[in-house]
Amino acid sequence: MAPPPPPKKTYPKVQFAYDAIQPKPSTEPPLPTSYAAQNHVPNPYVNSNLTHEKIAAIRAKSTMVKDDNDNDVNLDYSQPSDLYPESFPHFVRGRDSLREYLTQLFTTQIAIYDGAMGTMIQNYSKRNKLEEEEYRGNKFREWGCNVKGNNDMLSITQPQIIQGIYRAYLEEGGSNMIGTNTFSSTTIAMADYEMEDYAYELNYEGARLAREVCDEVTGKDPTKPRFVVGAIGPTNRTGSISPSVEDPSARNVTFDELVETYFEQIVGLVDGGSDILMVETIFDTLNAKAALYAVGEYLEFSGLDIPVFVSGTLVDQSGRTLSGQTGEAFYASIRHAKPMCVGLNCALGAEHMVPFVERLANCVECFMHVYSNAGLPNAMGGYDETPDDMAQNYKTFFENGWLNMVGGCCGSTPPHIKAIRELSASYQPRKLPDVGRPKMWLSGLEDLVVDDVHNHLGYPFLNVGERCNIAGSIRFKKLMMAGDYGKAMDIAKAQVEDGAHVIDINVDDGMLDGLAAMQKFVKIAVTEPEIAKVPFMLDASKFEIVMAGLKWCQGKPIVNSISLKVGEELFKEQATLLKKHGAAVVVMAFDEEGQAATEDEKVRICKRSYDVLVNEVHFPPEDIIFDPNVLTIGTGMEEHSNYGVDFIRACKTIKEQCPYVKISGGISNLSFGFRGVMKIRESIHSVFLHHAILESGMDVGIVNAKEMLALSEVEPEIKEAADKL
């Protein structure tokens, strides 16, 4: 089916005072909402003081209670405050804010990351013996399975090799920061070698070796501090992709399992002396969201401010991740974690990345990096770009001012990094974009800025498709009750084709296992590109059901809904959890006393909800959608006669008092008294929406886009009657 034709006329949005705010220069990337980040509190690097039970439990079960000399494992890396001068470019751990330091570094020069660890290990093995025996070392001499190829374990068994590689990138390459040899150091990835129990130790040692070499090299030239980037790889499982051709709902890992394995990795990396955490080589954004959730939990438990970098991987010239997202959608999905630097690495050479880096540089609010491969692999799996070739292929990035940090991935070596560093020195780093009015930015496989949307009728209005809602479609209900998910997907596809910008998913029914049905529907839907390209609205009366669906969404969805009906404390708990996952939220105009019906009640409850969300939970106001309750009119009951007008008036007042929020409603409720007479119902909806959108700024609605009428299509007599109604 062809997409709906473009609107003949585009209507302007209602403007509010905050819409006139002019963009202003940015002085630093968007900050996490924690006290430490907001106030640039230096990391004390005294990790022995971090005693949260979850951190302590991971240390307690680790394989390294003592070091090789039977001493307690060192967790502390603070330095004397007078070790180096108190001015940039010097840096002292425990005295200086790394966030402030990196901001100054990234705004004054293009910083240098390192190159490939695997390539260097392969190169070492060509000149030296590095077989099964060397991988095992003394510690794993009697190990029960083959371990050759487990490069991360060399941090334990051959530390001199790994430190030699670190040193080469720092001294020959001139890197400002180096990634730890921990790409696969998770319990999930280590299962291939039956080494799950060694995850903490692998991360600790990978970071500790880097810490030692960075301090050694910094000591030779304190004007160029070197930093340890704790590398968090993607694992070898994917949350968004089915491993079974026959069953699109099958998965080999859950979100919670990913969070658990990443959290253990993070504890090891920080205990080993990492300065920065980098979630890298992201081919499935759901995995990245789990890693960033784990990072957020660690930072909350520790109270530390540790800068976070995020690096995605676009697998081919389509410019998409393996799980199908565009670069812009990938960024929209993870920006809630407030990374300090975002970029791309691996899969492609620099020259193949140009259009995708440009698009990302045009939308990313923080610093930008690239560390590409040394070209595409040759027939033998090697990489042919010389250091000069690779540096020249980066020139487009430098000339356009797209980058703040640059390095290399597969095939790159210290000479490659040296050549890139020397060329980049002549160019200015990317300027942070100006900070303007915040906007709701959702994503499926593609991104969607809600504030910039106009629907197929030309209104500044987000069409949320209602037909994948058991309460909104008898056909959908029958299919779900029968377990016919294939045909249910056809309903979702048709809605997108008919003009839905977002798909509402609701499986509430007393005869259906909502928890299982929501998860199965979402897991299948995310594998269908024609559906998954748009964001989802996860809709349920039970919070645990929307949370279950949320954990299978790689994009940024909307959760429908929460309200003060459950009491302020539980309301805050639910909102905090949604904020951690990066979801936008619908907030119903309910409180402990019940549903808001009058204009004053709608405004009062929404304003109270807004103040709690924004001031106490620190929920982004642009990610809040209020539903002030569209109630049924035309019932013949006097107390119902003003419901439509009350809603329209409340919309405007709420948007005036609650900057940046959206207003939504279930439009079919309005005409429920006329059920069965679709011509009347759709005409009433058309007149109502025209007033609500253009006079009061209503901008979201759960609708059947195919049946929406333009006001000009409503018969004059019916229009007059609807206006009076």
Image: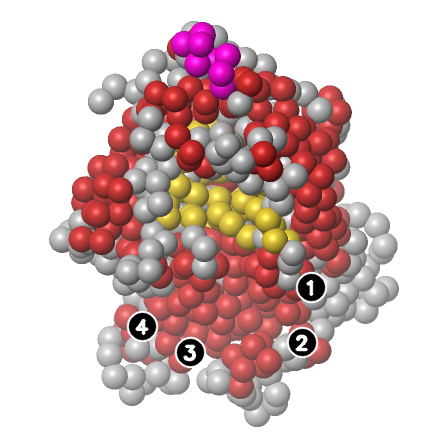
Badge 2: how crowded within 10 Å, few (<14), some, or many (20+)? some
Amino acid of disc 4: Ala
* Residue that appears at 45% across and 22% down: 684
In the orientation shown, which residue stands out farthest toward the left? 246
First along the sequence among labels 3 and 2 = 2
- Along the horizontal axis of the image, is 437 left or right of 230? right
* Residue that appears at 61% across and 89% down: 71
- As drawn, 454 above or below 514: above
* Residue that appears at 21% across and 47% down: 479
Magenta-tinted stretch? 715-722
Q: Where on the picture, by quarter, is residue 329?
A: top left
- Residue 528: x and y in percent read 26, 41
The answer to whether marks 1 and 2 mark residues whose Cβ atoms lie closer than 8 Å is yes
Image quarter in which the N terminus is found: top left
Q: Is mark 4 on a helix, strand or loop?
A: helix
**How far apart are the two marked residues, 4 and 1, measured between alpha carbons?**
31 Å
Amino acid of disc 2: Leu
Q: What element carries label 1?
A: loop
**How far apart are the two marked residues, 3 and 1, measured between alpha carbons?**
25 Å
Q: Identify the disc placed on residue 198.
A: 3
**How far apart are the two marked residues, 1 and 2, measured between alpha carbons?**
10 Å
Residue 719 can be seen in this image? yes
- Residue 655: x and y in percent read 68, 32
Badge 1: how crowded within 10 Å, few (<14), some, or many (20+)? many
Q: What element carries label 2?
A: loop
First along the sequence among labels 1 and 2 = 2
Residue 165 can be seen in this image? no
- Residue 201: x and y in percent read 48, 77
First along the sequence among labels 2 and 4 = 2
**How far apart are the two marked residues, 3 and 2, measured between alpha carbons?**
21 Å
- Along the horizontal axis of the image, is 319 left or right of 716? left
